[in-house]
Image (cartoon, rainbow, N blue to C red):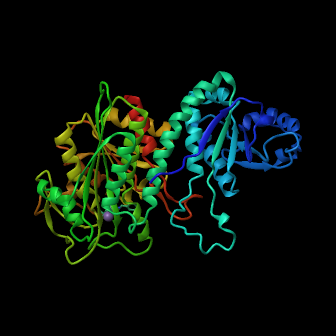
């Protein structure tokens, strides 16, 4: 699943000499009045354009005709809004790269002369801003077109959307080293995020449990972490009853993949990351309505984020022992499928009444959480899952739900969300919610009725961490996949990669 990354280089030449298809000049709304006029005049452009350009975050105006004086074929005025937050800067980067791809440009440049003052205004380091710029450019230029043959395109074969081949950053000498450091980190995070997005966007007929395992093996070989894949026989002999029950109606066998990154020197912490890998969620016998069911190809987003995060941490060489655990299967109806009312025995020995076969994520996560705690005795356990539609109702498509039994951990994840732009909001885990998942016939029910669906799902998971004191569950049902009409680019987002890297960086 290799991808050709965009080449990124720093240049210290003056603006006139920056040769690119499009050169962005970033302006904050505050700097607009004073600086933009002067800059435009120097470039030989009509300042009338400032009547239309307000420098809102992400706003872009493309100017032509600077070519006589400047090496760049086009200049873009790029709005940074008030330029007080990292989010504004990220939004501008995404919007700029997205515009360049729409224009089918190959070589783009950004004037980073103002990065020092932006660093002061936002309170973020120059390296952090540079990393965010790179990540934003990769995010904004992402298109999922590998399944388009181009055969029906009327125009020449060249009309296949081009990728941005090169990004130039014009920097001043004093900032150069720090920008370089940020760029190096940004490239890694961005490429792992892209890998995750590709996996999420691949439809069910291209990505089965075994393909997730293969992607992990490939990444592990390339970057140097161990991968062990447990196949159906081993899953059976271990007695992972949750994973097996969900897989029961499927033609394709389940897998349980363990990714193990252990740094050379001392390790500060052992961290277990668990990702839900449902390659397609039809709901099973409790079949989902057909409308938009295709979006359920994204039900392995947690798995993709965990894979992306483990690869990133390996490439960044964090001094942490990080274990990724990915239970994977699809959830299908058939004559062999599990039925509502069935009682299953999970890996932990805890019995579950399957009130609804569409509450399958928690069944496979239950086994993985128990396995993680028992086998690796981690200091921290974090699971990431597209667990409940209720979480979208509560928080929408921009924010993930956070549940934790540890206030410090919850706060650190919240802060990582603020920094990475992958926002989370904490929800409660009070025991009063246990009432809803009581079962008459088994230890617990996998459904909790109408109210507080995300909370009862989290309460269910909590039963399987065996009293671990440092656990968090992140419900990414909303932000992992943007439905059509949601944003400009819809589909998989890779949400979680950046968040987890930011969190682990703090502990590194
Ligand atoms: N994968 C879904 C949750 C989901 C819904 C993710 C929409 C992304 C977008 C999950 O397996 C599910 O079906 N949950 C049920 C739980 C219910 C049956 C208790 C839900 O949310 O309706
Ligand atoms: Mn489901
Ligand atoms: Zn699901």
Residue 178 x %, y %: 58, 26
Closer to the camera in the image, 249 or 426: 249
Residue at (59, 73) in percent of width and height = 151
Which is nearer the eye, 136 or 448? Answer: 136
Where on the picture, by quarter, is residue 332?
Answer: bottom left
Q: From the viewer's perspective, tell me whether residue 62 is left or right of residue 206.
A: right
Residue 29, image x and y in percent?
Answer: 73, 38
Quadrant of image for the N terminus: bottom left
Residue 321 image point, x, y percent: 30, 34
User: Is residue 55 something one can see in this rendering?
Assistant: no
Identify which residue, 377 or 450, lies in the foreground.
Answer: 377
The structure residue drawn at horizontal position 81% and vertical position 35%, both measured from the top left corner, is 16
Screen quadrant of the C terminus: top left
Residue 494 lies left or right of residue 24; in this view the side is left
From what the image shows, is residue 342 above or below residue 129? below
On screen, residue 24 versus residue 87, left or right, reads right
Residue in the picture at 10% in, 53% down: 349
């Amino acid at each position: 699943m290799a991808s050709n990354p965009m080449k990124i280089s720093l240049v210290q030449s003056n603006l006139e000499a920056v040769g690119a298809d499009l050169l962005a000049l970033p302006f904050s709304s505050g700097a607009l009045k004073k600086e933009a006029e002067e800059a435009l005049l120097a470039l030989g452009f009509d300042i009338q354009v400032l009547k239309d350009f307000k420098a809102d975050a992400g706003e872009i105006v493309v100017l032509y005709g600077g070519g006589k004086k400047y090496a760049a074929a086009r200049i873009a005025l790029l709005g940074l809004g008030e330029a007080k937050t990292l989010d504004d800067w990220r939004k501008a980067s995404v919007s700029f790269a997205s515009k360049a791809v729409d224009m089918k440009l190959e070589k783009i440049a950004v004037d980073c002369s103002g990065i020092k003052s932006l660093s002061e205004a936002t309170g973020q380091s120059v390296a952090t801003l540079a990393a965010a710029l790179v990540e934003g450019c990769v995010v904004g230029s992402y298109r999922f077109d590998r399944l388009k043959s181009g055969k029906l395109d009327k125009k020449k074969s060249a009309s296949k959307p081009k990728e941005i081949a090169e990004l130039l950053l014009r920097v001043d000498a004093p900032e150069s080293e720090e920008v370089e450091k940020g760029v190096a980190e940004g490239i890694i995070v961005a490429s792992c995020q892209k890998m995750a997005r590709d996996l999420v966007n691949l439809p069910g007929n291209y990505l089965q449990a075994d393909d997730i395992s293969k992607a992990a093996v490939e990444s592990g070989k390339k970057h140097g972490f161990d991968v062990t894949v447990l196949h159906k026989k081993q899953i059976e002999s271990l007695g992972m009853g949750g994973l097996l029950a969900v897989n029961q109606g499927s033609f394709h066998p389940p897998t349980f993949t363990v990714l193990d990154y252990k740094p050379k020197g001392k390790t500060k912490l052992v961290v277990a990351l668990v990702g839900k890998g449902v390659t397609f969620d039809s709901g099973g016998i409790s079949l989902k309505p057909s409308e938009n069911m295709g979006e359920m190809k994204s039900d392995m987003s947690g798995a993709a984020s965990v894979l992306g995060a483990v690869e990133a941490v390996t490439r960044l060489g964090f001094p942490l022992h990080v274990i990724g655990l990915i239970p994977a299967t699809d959830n299908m109806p058939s004559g062999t499928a599990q039925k509502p009312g069935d009682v299953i025995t999970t890996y932990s020995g805890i019995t579950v009444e399957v009130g609804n076969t569409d509450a399958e994520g928690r069944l496979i996560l239950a086994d993985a959480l128990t396995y993680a705690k028992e086998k690796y005795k981690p200091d921290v356990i974090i699971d990431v899952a597209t667990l409940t539609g209720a979480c979208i109702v509560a928080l929408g498509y921009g924010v993930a739900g956070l549940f934790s039994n540890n206030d410090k951990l919850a706060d650190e994840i919240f802060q990582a969300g603020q920094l990475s732009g992958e926002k989370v909001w904490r929800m409660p885990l009070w025991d009063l919610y246990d009432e809803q998942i009581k079962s008459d016939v088994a230890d617990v029910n996998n459904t909790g009725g109408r109210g507080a669906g995300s909370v009862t799902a989290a309460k269910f998971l909590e039963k399987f961490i065996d009293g671990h004191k440092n656990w968090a569950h992140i419900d990414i049902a909303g932000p992992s996949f943007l439905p059509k009409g949601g944003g400009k680019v819809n589909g998989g987002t890779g949400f979680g990669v950046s968040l987890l890297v930011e969190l682990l960086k703090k502990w590194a």
